[in-house]
Image: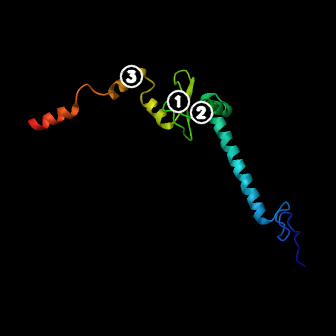
Amino acid sequence: MRYKRTPATCHPDAGNHSNGLCLECYNIKRAKYRKEQKIKAKDKIRDYNLSTKYNITLADYNRLLEVQNHCCIICERSHQKLVVDHNHKNGQIRGLLCQSCNIGLGSFKDKIDLLASAIKYLKPPSMDWNYAFKKREINA
């Protein structure tokens, strides 16, 4: 004699797969649960990394994000992910930056004099370089 399954509570015409649900509803519920667990795990990992690297919690990070209106402090553009910028000498957090701005600051090794030189370099030159190059081509 074959075992007869009780009907599912969600769809009475379907067989009961687990916890009173048909197979389709059970799979939907299971996928939703896995997604929630994955988000919780990511949040746990993020919280652990923030606390070990910068001595702040995920809640502190999220408050910083709100204060900065989800924008990078330097370029003031909204980004999906902002990284924690900190002083490498004393560990003090300065704010949240986009990846590009953080790499830029890192390239200058947090030295203000180098950044000032870069700003000076980026300002328009006093000499017309196009004129200088054209003059050289004529003389050559």
> Is there CB contact under 8 Å for labels 3 and 1?
no
| Residue 3 against residue 35 in the figure, above or below | below
In whole angstroms, how far apart are the C-alphas of marks 3 and 1? 18 Å
Q: Determine the residue located farthest toward the bottom in the rendered image.
A: 1
- Look at mark 2 in the image and give the residue it sits on: 69
Q: Is residue 116 left or right of residue 29?
A: left
The answer to which of marks 3 and 1 sits earlier in the sequence is 1
Residue 79 location, x and y as percent? 54, 39
Q: Is residue 16 left or right of residue 113?
A: right
User: Mark 3: which amino acid?
Assistant: Ala
- Look at mark 1 in the image and give the residue it sits on: 73
- Look at mark 3 in the image and give the residue it sits on: 116
Q: Is residue 121 left or right of residue 5?
A: left
- The answer to which quarter of the image holds residue 134 is top left
Q: Secondary structure at mark 2?
A: loop
Q: Nearer the viewer, mark 1 or mark 2?
A: 2
The answer to which of marks 2 and 3 sits earlier in the sequence is 2
- The answer to which quarter of the image holds residue 31 is bottom right
